[in-house]
Image (spheres, rainbow, N blue to C red):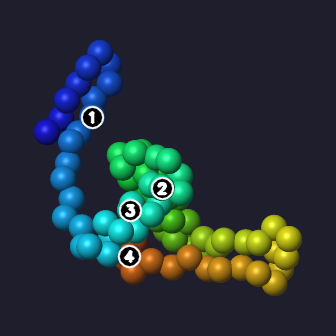
């Protein structure tokens, strides 16, 4: 369902989550003091960045700023990017 007020439109959706996903969602909400909708919007933004990087042949990494050459974690998701995107 899409709802518009003034010049802002939002779409309501529902999700089916496993008990483990619900636990993780609640854990992150407690750590960040975010509402579920806000947390999911940030998650979507991060996924968009990941897809953009992969579509350009790049990698997404988490880097320890204290040891950037030695402590890196490549972030890999089981997603097949079909074509180059322009965001």
The image shows residue 86 at horizontal and vertical percentages of: 48, 53
Distance between the Cα atoms at labels 1 and 2? 25 Å
Q: Earlier in the sequence, mark 1 or mark 3?
A: 1
The answer to whether marks 1 and 3 mark residues whose Cβ atoms lie closer than 8 Å is no
Residue 82 visible, this angle: no
Q: Which residue is mark 2?
A: 30
Q: Quadrant of residue 65?
A: bottom right
Q: Which residue is mark 4?
A: 79
Closest to the camera, between mark 4 and mark 2, is: 2
Residue at x 21% of width, y 59% of height: 15
Q: Earlier in the sequence, mark 4 or mark 2?
A: 2
Q: How many marks?
A: 4
Residue at x 46% of width, y 46% of height: 34
Q: Compared with residue 70, is residue 43 higher up or lower down, i.e. above or below?
A: above
Q: Compared with residue 28, is residue 87 higher up or lower down, i.e. above or below?
A: above
Assess disc 4: are there few (<14), some (14-19) or many (≥20) residues with their C-alpha within 10 Å of its C-alpha: few
Q: Which residue is mark 3?
A: 25
Distance between the Cα atoms at labels 3 and 4? 21 Å
Q: Which residue is mark 1?
A: 10
Q: Secondary structure at mark 1?
A: strand
Assess disc 1: are there few (<14), some (14-19) or many (≥20) residues with their C-alpha within 10 Å of its C-alpha: few
Distance between the Cα atoms at labels 4 and 2? 28 Å
Closest to the camera, between mark 1 and mark 2, is: 2
Q: Nearer the viewer, residue 62 or 31?
A: 31
């Amino acid at each position: 369902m899409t709802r518009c007020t003034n010049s802002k439109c939002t779409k309501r959706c529902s999700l089916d989550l496993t008990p483990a996903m619900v636990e993780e969602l609640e854990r992150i909400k407690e750590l960040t003091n975010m509402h579920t909708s806000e947390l999911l919007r940030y998650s979507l933004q991060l996924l968009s960045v990941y897809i953009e990087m992969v579509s350009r042949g790049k990698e997404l990494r988490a880097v320890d700023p204290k040891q950037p050459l030695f402590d890196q974690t490549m972030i890999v998701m089981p997603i097949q990017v079909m074509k180059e995107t322009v965001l």
